[in-house]
Image (cartoon, rainbow, N blue to C red):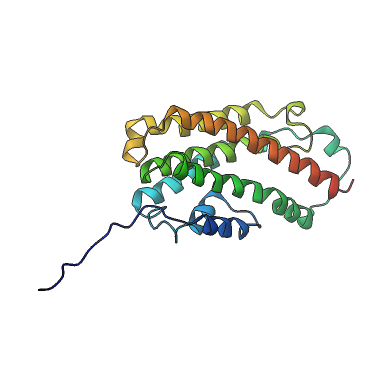
Amino acid sequence: MPVPAVTTETPFWEPPVSALLEQLVASSDGLSSEEAALRLTRFGPNLIHGERKRVQILLNNLLYDVSELPIPLDRVDDDYLSHPRHWDMKFIRNFMLVIGPVSSIFDFLTFYIMLAVFHAGEALFHTGWFIESMATQVLVIFIIRTRKNPFKSRPNPWLVACSLSVLAVAVLLPFTSAGVYLGFVAPPVFFFLILTTMLIAYLLAVEGMKRWFFRRFAAE
């Protein structure tokens, strides 16, 4: 008598810690949130697969682009305009290499927290990543737009208003019918407590790396 085949459901996520660290080390050049997700798809086939997941990524990019539309209106620090400056691609590359990995680390930390702390399924995992991704990339612009203390360099009011509006949309979207249609779910309150702590840590880390960078690389 033939033995019936045993089928097992493919888990949403089952990466060993060593695999997560491997991908983190491999991201020393800095990754966008979408690239960070792509690096981990071989450990979780459902991480970004599916029509709704692709729409979520496109929506993430669209909202971020909208938040940055007022950048041409933004103020530049007076001391930076005190004398002509050259467009230095090496300087920009070095800045990317220094600041980029900080974002990657916090993206991977979000992945870990969603899985290890919240034991998230697909919908909650995608929701948490979407909100964290939007929050970090929208808020960090206020850190990197100036080499000064961000509280001493006033951004254009339109940039502030547009950025905070987009962030509010990203946070509230999972609680709406449109969010449900896109595959999001309402995160628990504890998620927002952790997210707030992570955002503060992330922005402080970027500010610290920015100050070190300008001390080390900036040529007056």
Residue ID at (78%, 57%): 90
32 relative to 147 in the view: left or right: left
Measured as percent of width and height from the top left, residue 97 is found at 71, 54
220 relative to 163 in the view: left or right: right
Closer to the camera in the image, 128 or 179: 128
User: Is residue 15 something one can see in this rendering?
Assistant: yes
Residue lying furthest bottom: 1
23 relative to 5 in the view: left or right: right
Closer to the camera in the image, 160 or 85: 160
Count of labels in the image:
0
Residue ID at (78%, 38%): 147
Residue ID at (59%, 31%): 197
209 relative to 193 in the view: left or right: right
Residue lying furthest front: 1
Closer to the camera in the image, 103 or 66: 103
Residue ID at (60%, 34%): 199
Measured as percent of width and height from the top left, residue 121 is found at 37, 44
User: Is residue 61 something one can see in this rendering?
Assistant: no
| Quadrant position of the N terminus in the picture | bottom left
| Quadrant position of the C terminus in the picture | top right
Q: Is residue 3 above or below residue 186?
A: below
Closer to the camera in the image, 162 or 215: 215
Q: Is residue 41 above or below residue 125?
A: below
Measured as percent of width and height from the top left, residue 217 is found at 84, 50
Measured as percent of width and height from the top left, residue 80 is found at 83, 38
